[in-house]
Image (tube, helix red, strand yellow):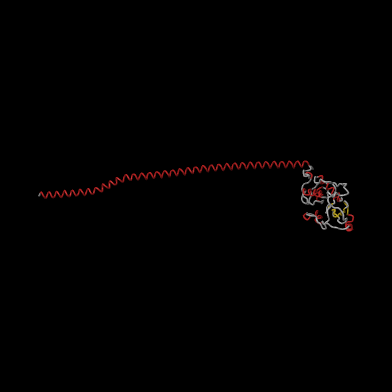
Amino acid sequence: MRILVVLICSLVLVSVAVGAKKEEKKSQPKKQAQTAQRAAQPTRATGGGASGKKASTATHQVQNNRNGRAAIAASNAQRGKKNQTSTAMNQGQKGKKAQTSNAAYQTQKAKKNQTLNQAQTGKAARGGEVTQRGKATAATTTGKTAKGKTAQVKPVKPQHFNLAKQPNTAKAPRVKFQQGRRIAGSQNWQGQQYTVFRNYKSEWHDQNWWRGHYRNNITFVFGAPYYWNAGYWFPAWGYNPNAYYAWDGPIYAYNRLPPDQVIANVQAALQQQGYYRGEVDGLIGPLTRGAIADYQRDHGLYTTSTIDQPTLQSLGMT
């Protein structure tokens, strides 16, 4: 009986021991898991701190970037304001300079106009005084007129001049005869008063021919014959083969005066107005033709360089 009890007790003890061992085996994994958890907790804490530092660093960089952008934007805005201010100042200075330059130009122009007006007033007041070029001022003439037209002027009475019997060929050289010669430029002179110049051409005939055609309308100047036709004197080439002519062309017959007296009266009129500075010799030489041409240009007439009706009308001689 005792032995049975002892056996039973032994079995109970063995079973208890075996259960205890099993419990210990079961508890060991739990302890290991708890230990692992406890060991992992510092690691997690450490990892969390690193990520926190990284997040904090990233936040700081973003803030720095924002601050940098803001500073750059402010700097650009300040530069833009400076550039706008500088541009406005430059434009203002340019505008002031342009206004000053324009004002100076207008002032100078006004002074020039005032000076010209004063000069013209002074010329008109002197009335008849000769200018530096030796030509009469506007007060002595009627001003420029249209081609072939003249203004009303004071009539000039014809004069008789005592002229030399022989021509001064040094001042008025002899011209040579050319059959059929026409006056250069006459095709451009329009109007009935210039028809005689457009139609003129040199002709050579003997004495009998000239007498037969013009009879009493022939006169002699410095020994050279001229014939009268339609209010003009013309050289009678061939009447006297050795005749002297200083001009081959028509001469307007002013008051039916002979050619030399007509020329002398024109020379005297041009001399009074400052156009002619030579001697009154009754010869229509280069100096006289040049004076006539200057007068014609200044008075809007065709430059015929000879004595025509519109020129004598302008001079008040017809």
Q: Horizontal and vertical percent for residue 141? A: 79, 45
Foreground of the two, 94 or 35: 35
Q: Horizontal and vertical percent for residue 291? A: 80, 48
Task: Give left or right: position of 37 versus 20.
Answer: right
Q: Quadrant of residue 122?
A: top right
Q: Horizontal and vertical percent for residue 279? A: 84, 46
Identity of the residue furthest to the front in this view: 170
Q: Is residue 221 above or below residue 100?
A: below
Foreground of the two, 56 or 188: 56
Q: Quadrant of residue 62?
A: top left
Q: Horizontal and vertical percent for residue 229? A: 85, 55
Task: Give left or right: position of 151 versus 209.
Answer: left
Task: Give left or right: position of 20 versus 81.
Answer: left
Q: How many marks?
A: 0
Identity of the residue furthest to the left in this view: 1
